[in-house]
Image (cartoon, rainbow, N blue to C red):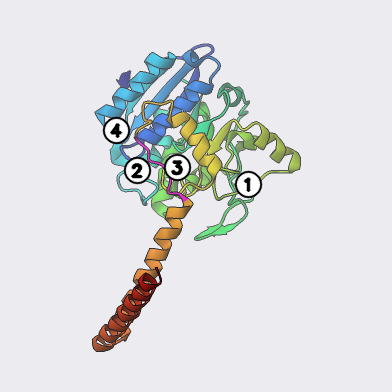
Amino acid sequence: MKKIQSYNLPSKEGGIYIYCATDANYAAVTGVMLTSLCMTAKDPKKLKIFIADGGISQEDISKYEGLETKFGAEVYLIEISKDIYSSLITNLYMTEATYYRFAVEHIFPTLDKVIYLDCDVVLMSDIAQLWNVDIGNNYFAAVRDHLGGQEFFDKVRPLWYSNAGVLLINLPRWRREGFLKKALEYIEREKPFLMDQDALNEVSQGLITRLHPKFNCAEGVSVHKTPFQDQREREETLANPVIYHFLGSKKPWTDDPATALAYKVFRRYADDSAWKNSFGKPVGWKKRIKSIRLAIRARKKNIIERVVPLPMRLRYEKLKYTIKYKVLKAHAKQK
């Protein structure tokens, strides 16, 4: 695996160029995503995978190198200039690495297009289906987000508001229009709640090629619904999804996955990856109910201790154990 700052070679005929970004927190999840990408590709040797390094450990880097050995894909580690991103807003779920998708115009100065993938997706079918989509003269191709046309925290999103998790990017247009500069200026100025996704939609001004939802399906694997155009589109997507996207905070690698399908799909690829021991199993429903009961009991005890005087609590405890002792004694005599 080569470490580079930019990829200056022309497109190889038949090559499929994939870009993603991660840090130490999501390196294992990214590894599972890339494993699914290679496993579902008809010819993984055509894959050129570029990983923007937001602070990946040497152990995970070694595992990424294993993708070359196992599948024959080319893997590159991108050294990102982090200074321009350090002052941007972040939160618990979206780190600085979230913004590295904007760097594509500098990383790939000679390519015509690249596929960007979030780390919380898995491939269910060959990525070549997305690669062969005609972007036209638009900035990128994407699937409509479930927040399209809705008010969410700071503002109402446009009716056709795209999700930023899966993008087929028109690189010549990004370079020509200076997309990176415009996006970062917008984030610095407006500090939007959905950060990179709001910036992508704002700068593109609707010049987006609309992808079939099968390329970014959250239906069935997250708490969010995919906005299908009609019933036929829904049936096509659920029958043959190309990419599943685990939207929201209930991720399948945590102890609280959104659905059983999400956990099943994620584990299928996690167990075949170099990161199979990086994830625990979800808490079962019996343990979850027990933990809720214990929490309620502790809360009730806390309330009682604050309200009921100590002498009265002691008399109650003595009476309770006296009754319990007499019941046990009576039961023993019956035997």
Q: Mark 3 points at which residue?
A: 182
Q: Can residue 294 be seen in this view?
A: yes
Q: Position of 310 compared to 74: left or right?
A: left
Cα distance, mark 2 to mark 3?
17 Å
Tag 4: residue type? Ile
Tag 3: Cα neighbours inside 10 Å, few (<14), some, or many (≥20)?
Answer: some
- Residue 69 in the image: x percent, y percent? 37, 14
Of pointers 2 and 4, the one earlier in the residue sequence: 4
Cα distance, mark 1 to mark 2?
26 Å
Tag 3: residue type? Lys
Q: Name the residue under label 1.
A: 160
Q: Nearer the viewer, mark 1 or mark 3?
A: 1
Please say if 293 is above or below 222.
below
Q: Is the magenta stretch mostly helix, strand or loop?
A: loop
Between 141 and 20, the residue placed more toward the observer is 20
Region in magenta: 278-284
Give residue 311's quadrant in the image: bottom left
Cα distance, mark 1 to mark 3?
20 Å
- Residue 70 in the image: x percent, y percent? 40, 16
Q: Name the residue under label 2.
A: 96
Tag 1: residue type? Trp
Tag 2: residue type? Glu
The reply to whether the magenta stretch includes residue 68 is: no
Please say if 55 is above or below 149.
above
Of pointers 1 and 2, the one earlier in the residue sequence: 2
SS at mark 4? loop
Q: Is residue 192 visible?
A: no
Q: Nearer the viewer, mark 1 or mark 4?
A: 4
Cα distance, mark 1 to mark 4?
35 Å
Q: Do the residues labelled 1 and 4 touch (CB within 8 Å)?
A: no
